[in-house]
């Protein structure tokens, strides 16, 4: 009965770990969605840069310097945001890889503990069977 309770507790721990993994996967999907949105915004800013460059070449007027400065500002901002997004994505990927590694290790530990408990249960069952057989022998001798 104690082994059964321990097995149940291990199964619950395993289920909790699986639920935690699902939560991590959900967070990963949310982060990926957010990064995709930021990437789209980044592409929009890069398109804005391209449009500003086209206007710069078409007009060649008094606004040349002003437009060029705006293009450079937007480009710099886009590059900074790109770098920040890449760094954040790398950090999230590293965290997720570590979480996956930790969950794999926990799963292996749970499997090992479960196997050990099952082996112990088999030994106890064998001992109980031996005791039952001895009791039958003793009852037969008493009769």
Image: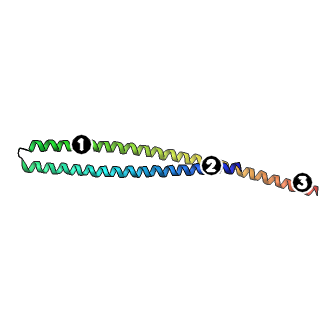
Q: Residue at x 55, y 46 (%)?
A: 106
Decide if residue 128 is on the left or right side of residue 25. right
In the rendered image, which residue does mark 1 sit on? 77
Real-space Cα distance between discs 2 and 3?
38 Å
In the rendered image, which residue does mark 3 sit on? 138
Residue 65, located in which quarter of the rendered image? top left
Expressed as whole percent of the image width and height from the top left, the position of residue 79 reads: 25, 43
**How packed is label 1: few (under 14 Cα within 10 Å), some, or many (20 or more)?**
some
Q: Residue at x 40, y 52 (%)?
A: 29
Expressed as whole percent of the image width and height from the top left, the position of residue 91 reads: 39, 42
Assign a secondary structure to mark 3: helix
Kindly give the residue lying farthest to the left in the view shown. 61
Q: Which image quadrant: the C terminus?
A: bottom right
Q: Residue at x 8, y 51 (%)?
A: 58
In the rendered image, which residue does mark 2 sit on? 9
Assign a secondary structure to mark 1: helix
Expressed as whole percent of the image width and height from the top left, the position of residue 82 reads: 28, 45
**How packed is label 3: few (under 14 Cα within 10 Å), some, or many (20 or more)?**
few
- Nearest to the observer: residue 103 or residue 36: 36
Assign a secondary structure to mark 2: helix
Q: Residue at x 13, y 43 (%)?
A: 68
Real-space Cα distance between discs 1 and 2?
53 Å
Which comes before the other along the chain, label 1 or label 2?
2
Expressed as whole percent of the image width and height from the top left, the position of residue 5 reads: 67, 50
């Amino acid at each position: 009965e104690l082994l059964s309770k321990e097995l149940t507790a291990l199964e619950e721990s395993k289920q909790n770990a699986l639920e935690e993994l699902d939560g991590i996967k959900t967070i990963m999907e949310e982060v990926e969605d957010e990064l995709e949105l930021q990437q789209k915004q980044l592409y929009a800013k890069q398109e804005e840069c391209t449009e500003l460059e086209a206007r710069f070449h078409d007009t060649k007027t008094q606004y040349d310097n002003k437009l060029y400065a705006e293009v450079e500002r937007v480009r710099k901002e886009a590059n900074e945001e790109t770098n920040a997004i890449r760094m954040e994505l790398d950090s999230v990927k590293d965290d997720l890889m570590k979480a996956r590694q930790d969950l794999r290790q926990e799963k292996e530990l749970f499997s090992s503990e479960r196997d050990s408990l099952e082996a112990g249960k088999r030994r106890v069952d064998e001992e109980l069977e031996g005791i039952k057989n001895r009791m039958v022998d003793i009852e037969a001798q008493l009769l």
